[in-house]
Image (tube, helix red, strand yellow):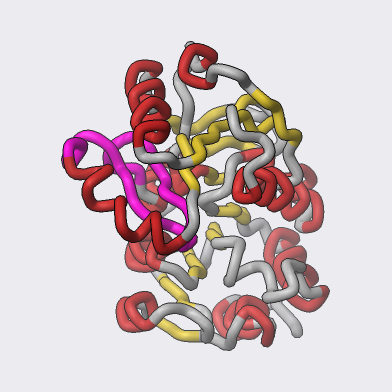
Amino acid sequence: MNYKLIALDLDGTLKTSQNTISEKTREVLIQCQELGIKVVLASGRPTPGLRHEALALELEKYEGYLLSFNGAKVNDYKTGEIIYEKALTVSQAKEMIQRAKEYRLAAMSYLDQDLISDQSDNSYVIGEAKLNDMGLRQIDDLTAFIDFPVNKVLLAADPDYVASVLDEFKAPYDGQLSIYRSAPFYIEIMAQNIDKAASLDCLVKHLGIKREEVIAFGDGYNDLSMVEYAGVGVAMGNAVEGVKEKADKVTLSNDEDGIAYMLNQLIDGVEL
């Protein structure tokens, strides 16, 4: 098969447990791009939170793509062109932020290069800003401030508390919004039917290629649809069992250059 696109989850997949891209994996992905294969970073992170990885993989030079917010936004890294976007409406975002107050959950969202929150001293809010290397902007009244559509509202609290309130919090919005627990301390809220596979399919059609020409790597449940969608869906060795069961192939872990190992097997001209 003449593969034309490689989609990569970040945390637990492209990045090691030390939060870095190994040199071997980086070199193999550069080789793939030299062969004309497009690379897509596909993550739950906000778009600015992907820039360091995009720079490391030279996506501007090779005209790669960013699939952020778990698929709520897809853009051309070099030109900034938005290929696909699905956002929460202003009223939906305001309602979620107000509901977060009622449940004593820290709420945050994103504006340009900043994380915005009315609890900028909250440890989980600070951690999200640091993880994505974003500025942190204190907003005194976040509900009033949000007068624009947002790709995601993120809520946070201690894991035990999040687990105890999640079902009750999201119950009224079944079939209206995508609300789920990601990290143990996070509740993610996005527009209904946000999905890495659906967004990847939009990009595939935009590029005029076939899904059979796509390789996708992932490790978590939010990668499952993308792994199932791709012509070759690859689970990392450290992936959850549900992803391994549905994947076409299972490679080595993220700490063992699993991406490089598999691409060496699948693509002629790639050397380890």
Residue 214: horizontal and vertical position, in percent? Answer: 46, 62
Which is more toward the observer, 96 or 64? 96
Residue 115: horizontal and vertical position, in percent? Answer: 65, 33
Q: Is residue 83 above or below residue 243?
A: above
Q: Residue at horizontal 59%, vertical 84%?
A: 253
Residue 82: horizontal and vertical position, in percent? Answer: 54, 29
Which is more toward the observer, 49 or 208? 49
Q: Is residue 190 magenta?
A: yes
Report whether 83 appears left or right of 176. Answer: right
Report whether 99 appears left or right of 263. Answer: left
Report whether 43 appears left or right of 30. Answer: left
Q: Residue at horizontal 33%, vertical 67%?
A: 228
Q: Is residue 3 visible in the rendered structure shown here? A: yes
Q: Is the C terminus in the top left, top right, bottom left or bottom right quadrant?
A: bottom right
* Quadrant assignment, res 205: top left
* Quadrant assignment, res 31: bottom right
Q: Residue at horizontal 36%, vertical 66%?
A: 224
Which is more toward the observer, 64 or 247? 247
Q: Is residue 38 above or below residue 137?
A: below
* Quadrant assignment, res 27: bottom right
In the image, the segment drawn in magenta is: 172-194
Badge count: 0
Q: Is residue 1 visible in the rendered structure shown here? A: no
Q: Residue at horizontal 45%, vertical 41%?
A: 105
Which is more toward the observer, 124 or 209? 124
Q: Is residue 9 magenta?
A: no
